[in-house]
Structure formats: C-alpha cells, structure tokens
Amino acid sequence: MSRPEDSPCEPLFGHAPDVAESAFVSKLAYLVGDVTVGARASLWPFTCLRGDGGAVVVGDETNVQEFSMLHGAEIENNVTIGHSVVVDYATVEAHSLVGMNSCVLRDATVESNCLVAAGAVVLQGQTIPEGHLAYGAPAQTKPLSDDQRDEIERVHEHYVELSREYRETGRFE
C-alpha cells in the first residue's frame, strides 16, 4: 500500500491514507487521516473519506461513487457505495450495495449480501440482517429477491471493470 502520486491524500493526527497500488482513486476524491483503501477498490470524483475520529477502511474491489462521504466507516470487500451516500461511524459488510442518497448512521451494521435502497436511512445502532433489503426512512427490512441479489453482483462487477479501464487509460488520474 502507498499514497498515490498527485492524489488528494492528506495526513492528519499522525495517520496518512494508505492506498493499494491497484486501486483507482480519482484526483477529485479527498482522503484524510486514518484511511485504508484495498486492492482494486475505486474512489470516484467528489468522494470524501475522513479518518479523523476513527479509521475508514475500504475493502478490496469496493467502489465508492461520486459525492459519497465515509467518516469513521468500515466498508468490507466487494461492496458498492452508490452516489451521494453517507456512512458515518458504521459498518457495511461484504457483498452489499448501499443505494443512492441513503444514510447509514453511527453504530449501524449492514450485514453481508444486503441491499440498502436509494434514499433509505439506516438508523443509529440498527442492524440490517444478512440477505435483506433495507428501504424507507427509517429503514424497514425484508428478504432480498433473486433479482436483487443478481443486481448487487452485476453492479459490483461493472465497477471493478470500469475502474480497471479508468486506471489503464489514465482518466481522472
């Protein structure tokens, strides 16, 4: 792991962002403090990862899309964080998708293989059980359909490939 050249990575409180060589980090992303970004992960323009009051961890092959904010958040492997999402001192487990304009609040956990619908609010301390859809504000849950499970995987695979293409062509880098 390293700090990408010409990237918006800033040390703070004795910690500096640590980014895997194979990750894609847009020049328009901002990383500060105790931040770790895993292999083949992608951080798209206008994302903000603040590790100033707790570590931010972005797992392998996880994508964080435009205008999203991670603050003291643990995001495991193979997760999609959609556009304009806030994850604040919370955990999103592997193989999950957090939809556009949703919030996952302090001490909440989205367990593995979950879909947080666009606009949902996962409340402070709430746990979304494995294999469930979270929808609404406050979030309610129900088991995922097969189509929803397929969509989580399709979106994940798309962003892994897209970030590879961006790295190879140098776009936003």
Image: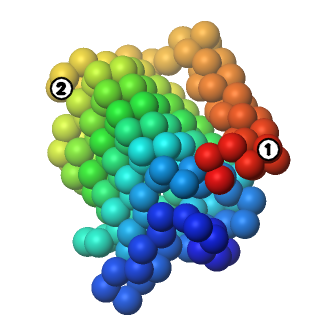
Q: Which mark is residue 169?
A: 1
Q: Is residue 86 left or right of residue 65?
A: left
Q: Is residue 115 left or right of residue 38?
A: left
Q: In which quadrant of the rendered view does residue 129 lie?
A: top left
Q: Secondary structure at mark 2?
A: loop
Position of residue 59 measured from the top left corner of the image (x, y, whole percent): 58, 56
What is the residue that sits farthest to the bottom in this orientation?
14
Up-down relation of residue 155 to residue 62 (above or below): above
Asked whether the beta carbons under mark 1 and mark 2 sit within 8 Å of each other, the answer is no
- The residue indicated by pointer 2 is 138
Q: Mark 1 is on which residue type?
A: Thr
Q: Mark 2 is on which residue type?
A: Pro
Residue plotted at (18% across, 26% down): 138
Residue plotted at (70% across, 28% down): 158
What is the residue that sits farthest to the right in this orientation?
168
Q: Could you tell me if residue 92 is visible in this image? A: no
Along the line of sight, which residue is nearer the eye, 20 or 168?
Answer: 168
Q: In which quadrant of the rendered view does residue 156 lie?
A: top right
